[in-house]
Amino acid sequence: MTQHQPQPQQFYLTAPSECPYLDNRAERKVFTHLVGSRAPELNDLLTQAGFRRSQNIAYRPACESCNACVSVRILAGEFQMTRSMRRIWKRNQDLIGFANKAEPSSEQYSLFHDYLNHRHHNGGMSEMSVLDYAMMVEDSHVNTQIIEYRMRGADTMITGKGEGPLIAAALTDVMGDGVSMVYSFFNPELADRSLGTYIILDHIMRCNALGLPHVYLGYWVNGSEKMHYKTRFKPQEHLTTKGWLRTDIAD
């Protein structure tokens, strides 16, 4: 009987395009498809190598004259909240996050649309349709959840679920060595809650509950103010030419 050897993974390179983070820069990406039974294992390996997932694509920057994008992961077991983080955590204890299957809903899309209009109205995702959003959530061949955050209710202790309107959501991959935060969004009118920080803190707690060491935050972009917040969650490691190394970058 003839045994078929697995085909080697194919990688592709995009054409140059305008960098969304730094002015007067061009970006290129190397990418591959995450499909089939090997997708979860491959996603783990590629995430550890600095790739990010978007739908069934894994990609990483491959810019010719720039290395500003640096993969970041939090060491969840060693993490300690700062004083301001403790205040944010306490402020949001009336919320509860429930992990659902990666299935889109009209309520999610409405919140997602409002978030983009307020926070990223000129970004590349601002024109995403309902169908585009649905594909972002459900087009995954790996272990993906969408965590919905709502107010705690009378039955929360029994069901683990909150009540009332959707306040925030996070699309998250659960991997062998941690969780990867693919995309999160929240009610932009609740700025006093600092929901972006709260969602990351909640993922650190979830990671510890699972006994997993890392929360992958994606890319910190050196020189981009809107990516600077990622350096606040310490200790953390950055992916370098020598592998993952702890960093002491100041807040």
Image: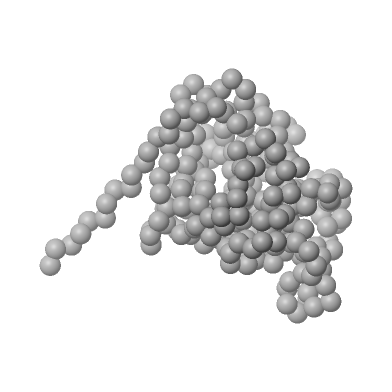
Q: Residue at x 58, y 64 (%)?
A: 103
- Residue 22 visible, this orientation: yes
Could you say where residue 85 lies in the image, as x and y percent from the top left? 81, 48
Could you tell me if residue 231 is visible in this image?
A: no
| Residue drawn 60% across the image and 31% down it | 20
- Residue 224 as seen in the image, left or right of residue 89: left
Q: Quadrant of the N terminus?
A: bottom left
Name the residue at 75% across, 61% down.
166
How is colour applied across the structure in the image?
one colour
Q: Position of residue 73 (x, y in %)?
A: 60, 45
Q: Is residue 194 above or below residue 246?
A: below
Residue at 72% x, 54% y is 111
The quarter of the rendered structure image containing the C terminus is: top right
Q: Going by the image, does 190 lie left or right of 112?
A: right
Residue 157 in picture, x, y percent from top left: 78, 76
Residue at the extreme left: 1
Residue 221 location (% of width, % of height): 62, 32
Count of numbered marks: 0
